[in-house]
Image: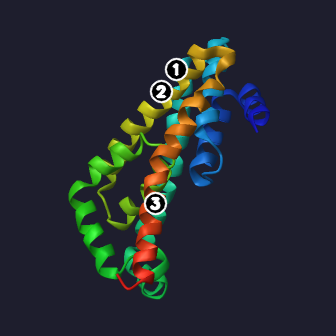
Amino acid sequence: MVDFIRWLVQHFGYLGVFLLTLAETVFPPLPSEVIIPVAGLEAQRGAMSLPGVIAAGTAGTMAGNLFWYLLARRLGLRRFKPLVDRYGRWLTTEWRDIERGERYFSRHGALFVFVARLLPAIRTFISVPAGFAAMPIAAYVAWSTIGTAMWTGALAYAGWKLGEQFSEINLILQPLSVAIIAPFLGWYLWRLMRQAHGG
């Protein structure tokens, strides 16, 4: 995958960075933790500028973010009530929990969106609750762009700084991703077992 990403960046430059980060946001299995450092490496070689890489990566990611936000906002949370009623056990939640979360997000959505953009794994999915909660689009775009630019800038600079050793970024980010995801997974399993025992 790294070779393919490098080939696209080398042959299409900023457009390649834009398309890769757009695809990464719409199809999360593509890793921004690899895409942006590779582009930063190319900037270090002089093929592109570092600010250009950050701008292209931020623009591509924001295009994907807006796709999820607008889709969730158009669908609306109410359309998911039958799914929650039917599969709430597996979601470890009830509809009243969803409504409570929506109200909380409506009050503190800007902070959630900004912080989530800086967290691996979570950063892609925050657009959906923002859309469901009908967060004002101006605030959503502003806070998302700031957080996304910071994330993209950090990864691009890391690739530029490390040069050929950009793979070392994964030695840092992969354990960080696990550290973030593991508590959520543990919490989900605990909730699932508690519900199974009538808790």
Q: Are marks 1 and 2 in contact (CB under 8 Å)?
A: yes
Q: Is residue 69 visible?
A: no
Q: Quadrant of the C terminus?
A: bottom left
In the rendered structure, the answer to whether residue 86 lies left or right of residue 17 reads: left
Res 38 quadrant in image: top right
Q: Residue furthest left?
A: 107
What amino acid does circle 3 point to?
A: Gly
Relative to 131, say whether 198 is above or below: below
Residue at 44% in and 57% down: 184
How many numbered discs sit on the rendered protein? 3
Q: Specify which label sits upstream in the sequence, 1 or 3.
A: 1
What amino acid does circle 2 point to?
A: Gly
> How far separated are the C-alphas under marks 1 and 3?
33 Å
> How far separated are the C-alphas under marks 1 and 2?
6 Å
Relative to 150, say whether 80 is above or below: below
Q: Which mark is residue 153?
A: 2
Along the line of sight, which residue is nearer the eye, 111 or 75? 111
Q: Residues within 10 Å of mark 2 (few under 14, many from 20)?
A: many
What secondary structure is found at the residue carrying circle 3? Answer: helix
